[in-house]
Image (cartoon, grey):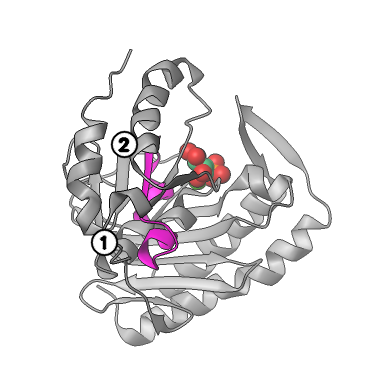
Amino acid sequence: MISAEEQKQVLSLVRQTKDLILKEMKNEEVMVKGAANYVTNVDLAVQNFLKEELGKAFPDIALIAEEKENTGLSEEGTYWILDPIDGTANLILDFRMSAVALGLYEKGEIVFGAVFNPFTDELFHAAKGEGAYLNGNAIHASSTEHFGDAVISYGSTPYTKSEAKNLFPIFYNIFMKCGDFRRTGSAELDMCYVACGREHGYLERDLKPWDYSAGTIIVREAGGVVRTWKGEEPTYLTNGDILACAPQFEEILLKELAGEKKS
Ligand code: IPD
Ligand code: CA
């Protein structure tokens, strides 16, 4: 766990990335990592900044990050888990729906998380047992009762399109029962939107640790649920098929997701 003073320090570092992001975006360079998968100078600048500053403030805590080799991880360890820009494709499109996401992993669980959208100035954060907040105000998952009114956000897993024939029938079944769908392009923001009631559920297969770690503690501290599609606890150090939702929709969503086949 980190103290209230340390949390303040980390949140201030996360907010400081805004100027860096806006500056780096003026000379944007895009590199292609794979199908529908990009990295920019913005991602790299944010990662370098936070790696350096967190390293100075917390020399004993190693960093796991998207634009980095992550080897020799131990379940018993303590790590920062960083996505310097979650929603890189959105950033390139000037969609203004991207976030810096930082989680703190401690022995199998996430104990602190911060997700910051520099374009809306929205900073979500939570620490274990202390509630979830948006710009300092407490947030809660939605209490909407009927699944027919629920807005569900999904990730399309664009990097493995071969899975779409298995995934989309599941999404179709859910779509026919819920109110409507969203696709934001930032997993971490989707999770925060579940935490503050803008969405009632979010599901995506094969998320990387940095796509869901910070969001997990924010959803849980807001009274929401985070599970794998099999209803298990995510690992945080490996990829996961992730469901985040208001608790009243956990059962119905897990039942639908259990019908998913992998080829
Ligand atoms: C991606 C976003 C997107 C999700 C992908 C992620 P990135 O992260 O969160 O919403 O669908 O699975 O990889 O690549 O923009 O950091
Ligand atoms: Ca990401």
The answer to whether residue 80 is seen in the rendering is: no
Does mark 2 have its CB less than 8 Å from ligand 1?
A: no
Element at label 1: loop
The answer to whether residue 216 is seen in the rendering is: yes
Query: Which residue lies most toward the right here?
Result: 27
In the depicted structure, whether residue 166 falls above or below residue 75: above
Q: Quadrant of the image for the C terminus?
A: top left
| Residue linked to disc 2 | 241
In the depicted structure, whether residue 250 falls above or below residue 72: below
Magenta-highlighted residues = 192-213
Looking at the image, tell me whether mark 1 or mark 2 is earlier in sequence order. 1
Q: Does the magenta stretch include residue 161?
A: no
| Residue linked to disc 1 | 224
Q: Give the amino acid type for the residue marked by disc 1 in the picture.
A: Gly
Residue 242 picture location, percent across and down:
31, 42
Query: Which residue lies most toward the bottom here?
Result: 5
Q: Looking at the image, which residue is at 36% across and 75% down?
A: 139
Q: Does the magenta stretch include residue 207?
A: yes
In the depicted structure, whether residue 261 falls above or below residue 219: above
Residue 121's quadrant in the figure? bottom right
Residue 10 picture location, percent across and down:
45, 75
Q: How crowded is mark 2: few (under 14 residues within 10 Å), some or many (20 or more)?
A: some
Query: Which residue lies most toward the top here?
Result: 263
Q: Left of 105 or right of it: where is 151?
A: right
Does mark 1 have its CB less than 8 Å from ligand 1?
A: no
| Residue 84 badge | none
Element at label 2: strand
Residue 61 picture location, percent across and down:
34, 62
Q: Looking at the image, which residue is at 63% across and 67% down?
A: 118
